[in-house]
Image (tube, rainbow, N blue to C red):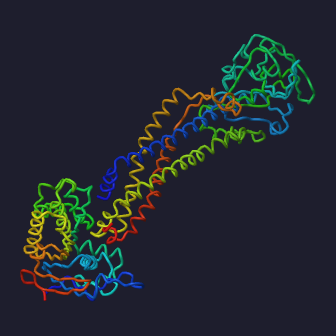
Amino acid sequence: MLFIIAWRNLWRNRTRSVLIASSVALGMWAGLFIMAIYFGMGDSRLRIAIDNEHSHIQIHHPRFADDFEAQYSLPFDSLNRILQQKPEVKAFSLRSLTTGMVATASGSQGIQVNGINPGAEQATRGLAAFVTEGEYLDTERRHPVLVSTKLAEKMKLKTGGKVVLTLLDTASNMTSGAFRICGLYRTTNAPMDELNVFVQKDDLDQLIGTSGRLHEAAVLLHRDDALDPVFHRLQRQWKGYRIERWQEISPETALVLSSLDTYSIIFIAIILVALSFGIINTMLMAVLERTPEIGVLMAVGMNRWRVFRMVVWETVLLAVTGAPAGLLAAWITVAWLHHTGIDLGGIMGDTLRNFGYASIIYPILPWHNVLQTMELVLLTAAIAAMFPAFKALRLKPVEAIRK
Amino acid sequence: MDAVIDAHNISKVYNPDTIPVYAVNNVHLHLNRGDFAALVGPSGSGKTTLLNIIGGLDIPSDGWVEINGVNITGLPPNRLIDFRLHNIGFVFQAFNLIPVLTARENVEFIMLLQKRPKKEREARVRELLTAVGLEDKMDIRPAQLSGGQQQRVAVARALASKPQFVLADEPTANLDSQSATALLDIMEKLNREAGMTFLFSTHDRRVIDRARRVSTLVDGRVTKDEPGTTPSTTA
């Protein structure tokens, strides 16, 4: 009966209740929508980090990451053989890496030269998909090099042009080689684009003396959740190697992703705190308007705990009535925008790319966050109910009836 | 006789530290089971205050009230509410029904607070609303009932808890003559047939004429306590 009274009381002032329920719905929609954008950005960053940049796991010589010297390499054949045998591994790329410099009439620029097997690299991070001009490295041309559009603009490089790369070999001596620009690429990570050029592994190995060796094995798995088991097995298998997951390779990405939950909760909490003032105000008005009625209820035998519960019920119902509408609106908006994407490129230009994010965001609304938001709405309503409920509790029947 | 209400030396003083105003001044009142009594007096004489004190809604500055031998004056607030729920029925001048509940629900609500079983509740609601002549208005909300009908629902609500007695504060003040007469008929019938004790505060001649005992209050003091038109059952 308390529930019925609370529910019917809610609709005694229909306009006021509808307004508050609408505010809750709007707040809920806004909160969930912003949350979905956050998660969409996070997911996009995660996919880029894994599918286009670092893969799930990377294996290096323990000293390579510290000094980045070509001499710290790993045996190609054994790694190749073992990785081929792992059923969880979707693709892997065994790379030779070195630092160097590209020099043209426009200037010079420090770079990282990636010696890759074009097929394996394509399978591991889909590099061919980012070629915007010319051809990918699987070309018939001799000594092809793939450079980014950003580097090409800066150094005034053109497809088909020749470029000399000066590199450090395994003995830390300078060596150089002439390469023909087969194509230009543009990924979603502008800073990485500017630094990296890609050549065929054999070409680089000849120049720096790493035939039969490799500096980096990038391993892409079929499933994200296989990461930890595979990682631990590889660690046990290759004790002397430096084996890292994407979280260790790109800690900033891991940090961003791990803080998404916190950010979204903070965001929702701010919205709900603002809403709670509206709810408190409405419920205080309701208690004030119904003071004689509450007095009568207490007079005829409704104890304080029941009065308290009645006000809390009413407040929670007020909040919860608007929440499903907000949830539905958010779900529809997110489902639609997840399909079409939100292109922020026009507004933000290359800003997102400069931070390694795609300019098209596909919002995502994970269910556990929706449930968490619902819990927060309930909690807010319960907290917002306290003040009006205590106000009702303090009423003395004889005084309340007279008002 | 079987005493239901025993009010001893009841006083209610406002502003005791500055200019004391006695709303009720050293009143003794004793009501037996089956009484049909009225507290009468001019406005401001202390009728409602005394009624509220007897009903446990207000605390006296001095004295105490015993209901069925239980001193309710010293009861803690929650026990007092519980005591009211099981022992006292209230009828207010402004009806004070819960507007969002139907007539049936308004009556049933009290029994729900008492945690009575559903079957018993349903039977009693029907019995009471039939007794007050509203068996065909059970599912109507107060706003759709006339003042007289609302007050009849209020009487049914007051009786729902099977109280020891009913306190009715100016129950006919907001009613037209016909409704007031009908209401008094019902209450008188309940008193005669079911032995329900009623204590009214009123200036309504119609109520005073039917009361079997009339206590007159002037400036918070009982100036007269005498049988009404019919012989009083109390000393």
- Residue B32, x across and y down, in percent: 15, 83
Residue at 18% x, 71% y: name it. B162
User: For residue A92, which quarter of the picture?
Assistant: top right
User: For residue B136, which quarter of the picture?
Assistant: bottom left
Question: Is residue B7 rendered to the left or right of residue A197?
Answer: left
Residue at 24% x, 73% y: name it. B86
B176 to B58, vertically: above or below: above
- Residue A112, x across and y down, in percent: 81, 28
Q: Nearer the viewer, residue A261 or A114?
A: A261
Quick one: quadrant of the C terminus of chain B?
bottom left
Residue at 41% x, 62% y: name it. A389
- Residue B124, x across and y down, in percent: 15, 64
Residue at 20% x, 72% y: name it. B168
User: For residue A83, which quarter of the picture?
Assistant: top right
B223 to A87, vertically: above or below: below
Question: Is residue A200 rendered to the left or right of residue A40?
Answer: right
Question: Is residue B120 rendered to the left or right of residue A246?
Answer: left
Q: Nearer the viewer, residue A144 or B210?
A: B210
